[in-house]
Image (cartoon, helix red, strand yellow):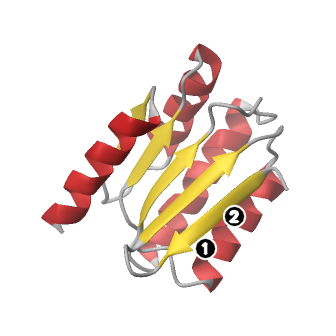
């Protein structure tokens, strides 16, 4: 499975890692799984560092639109995207520009910085 995730209900945290080429269907499966498990409102870390993204700019924008849909129909939590390579960082930026919602979103080059920022977001809420 290209996208693997865990949900910690006590910490209200979702951690997802993409390890293989990721498709739109993979991300939609992630959205559906997190929603079904009651984690959509939780803080999220999504690491795409080790994944060659198989998504076009149009697909990234479409996924951003999907996030906006989720935001309109319930609360979504803060999102920290970890993208160490220049390619993954550029793709994360396209997604972030399309996924405009009332929640904090930041892109990071390293996991530790992402977690530190996300913990600060959780403390504020």
Q: Secondary structure at mark 2?
A: helix
Say which residue appears at 74% left-offset and 53% top-offset.
Answer: 3
Q: Position of residue 95 (x, y in %)?
A: 55, 40
Q: Position of residue 52 (x, y in %)?
A: 77, 29
Categorize mark 2 by other alpha carbons within 10 Å: few (<14), some (14-19), many (20+): some
For this rendering, which residue is in front, 96 or 17? 17
Q: Is residue 82 above or below residue 78?
A: above
Q: Disc count in the image?
A: 2
Q: Are marks 1 and 2 in contact (CB under 8 Å)?
A: yes
Q: Is residue 116 visible?
A: yes
For this rendering, which residue is in front, 92 or 82? 82
Q: To which residue does mark 2 refer? A: 30
- Horizontal side of 112 relative to 24 (left or right) equals left
Categorize mark 1 by other alpha carbons within 10 Å: few (<14), some (14-19), many (20+): some
Q: To which residue does mark 1 refer? A: 34
Q: Residue furthest left?
A: 124
């Amino acid at each position: 499975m290209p996208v693997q995730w865990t949900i910690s209900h006590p910490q209200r945290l979702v951690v997802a890692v993409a390890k293989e080429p990721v498709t739109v269907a993979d991300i939609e499966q992630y959205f559906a799984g997190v929603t079904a498990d009651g984690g959509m409102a939780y803080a999220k870390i999504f690491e795409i560092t080790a994944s060659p993204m198989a998504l076009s700019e149009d697909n990234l924008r479409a996924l951003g639109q999907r996030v906006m849909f989720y935001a309109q129909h319930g609360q979504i939590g803060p999102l920290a995207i970890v993208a160490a390579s220049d390619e993954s960082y550029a793709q994360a930026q396209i997604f972030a520009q399309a996924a405009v919602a009332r929640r904090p979103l930041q892109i990071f080059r390293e996991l530790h910085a992402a977690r530190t920022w996300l913990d600060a977001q959780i403390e504020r809420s």
